[in-house]
Image (tube, rainbow, N blue to C red):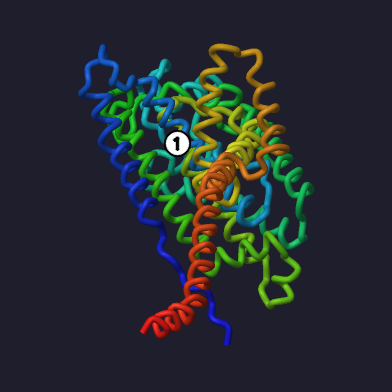
Amino acid sequence: MTKLPTKGPLLSGKGWTAFFVALIAVCALAPMLNMLVPEGSALHMSDYAVALVGKIMCYAICALAMDLIWGYTGILSLGHGLFFALGGYVMGMYLMRQIGRDGNYKSDLPDFMVFLDWKTLPWHWTFSDSFIATLIMIVAVPGLIAFVFGFFAFRSRIKGVYFSIITQAMTFAAMLLFFRNETGFGGNNGFTDFKRILGIPMQTQEMRMTLFALTGLTLLGFFLFSKWLIASKFGRVLQAIRDAETRVMFSGYSPLGYKLTIWVISAIMCGVAGALYVPQVGIINPGEMSAANSIEIAIWAAVGGRATLIGPIIGAFVVNGAKSWLTVAYPEYWLYFLGALFIAVTLFLPDGIVGLVKKWKARIKAPSAGRREAQRSLAAEQGVEASALAPLAVDAKGARA
């Protein structure tokens, strides 16, 4: 009887060490460098750096979500920017209600509604003043929309480039909808000028570091969850669907439930990332649903290395770190760089940065492994020669005696 492979540890010893180093850096080191180290010191972490790293960690969550569906399930989505923006809009609605009468028009309604001569809040703003309801909606709204879309798409067996095009069309349609003033989402300007969260001013250094640490903890938590999920039976079926979906069906598994589940999980992760992004950046508008933003998420996963989990996180930091520098130094060439990077990775680094590092390590180990193999062969030959000469030595001793 064939035995199933035994389930290994969630992380290796080195993996747990790196995880706890990242945990300490997010929860202790970064706050200390920002709040305790003087601004004139070379070790000081500026407020700009805090905001930038916090934003990139939100992007890294999206890249991790993309890896679950593209790297491990073979589903390329070009519409994940929609789920990211939906989570951001839900959080933005709560933050707009927290402004209260501190707006320009001194009204209980958000300023843009007063400007448009609205008299009451739209129905979809009903529970936006409750933080608990907001947390529920951050998960429920992207998850529900992903479920409805995914159910009909996967049931119709839409795959490959056709699925990618449909997801991008869905995101573009949502962007056009949110641009309209009558939908109650702020139109072209979206939501901004946030004041408080849970009644606490948002512009304080303590709140900024709290949001930073919460984002880092969420990223690390989603990483562990993804590792557990992929190592489970569910994860093995996902990889089988990616490699040979027809065989999976002939084996008695229905791909619909598996694909729909991981699709919804991925969408929820992006929604949570969007909700963490908005209070740190201070704005949310329909531009977050643009096609370019969704394509960038796929680029982060490809650059870092698909089906590795850690690769997309690295890719998000590398690409967005380069973007933050290039948009200042060479703003007119940034989009050309992004396109060239995606083409170069596709042609020359199909396994991304992580794959390149693995190949580099394998090349380093190859000569040493060859030397060890040669030494073992030489020792074996010497052992054979010694065993062959042993009887002669015995006879020589007998002759001398």
**Going by the image, does 209 lie left or right of 355?**
left
> Would you place residue 358 above or below residue 295 in this image?
below
Report the amino acid beneath label 1: Met
Quarter location, residue 350 = top right
Nearest the camera: 224 or 15?
Answer: 15
* Residue at left offset 40%, top offset 26%: 51
x and y percent of residue 382 in the render? 50, 67
Q: Whole-percent x and y of residue 223?
A: 45, 50
Q: In the image shown, does 147 or 233 lie closer to the viewer?
A: 233
Query: Which residue does the image show at 39% across and 39% down from the upper left?
Result: 215
Q: 10 Å neighbourhood of mark 1: few (<14), some, or many (≥20)?
A: many
Is residue 294 visible in the rendered structure shown here? Answer: yes
Q: Residue furthest front?
A: 400
Where 124 sits versus 281, above or below?
Answer: below
Front residue of 27/291: it is 27
Quarter-wise, where is residue 255 in the image? bottom right
Q: Position of residue 134 (x, y in %)?
A: 42, 44
Q: Nearer the viewer, residue 127 or 249?
A: 249
Number of numbered discs visible in the structure rendering: 1
Q: Position of residue 254 (x, y in %)?
A: 67, 71
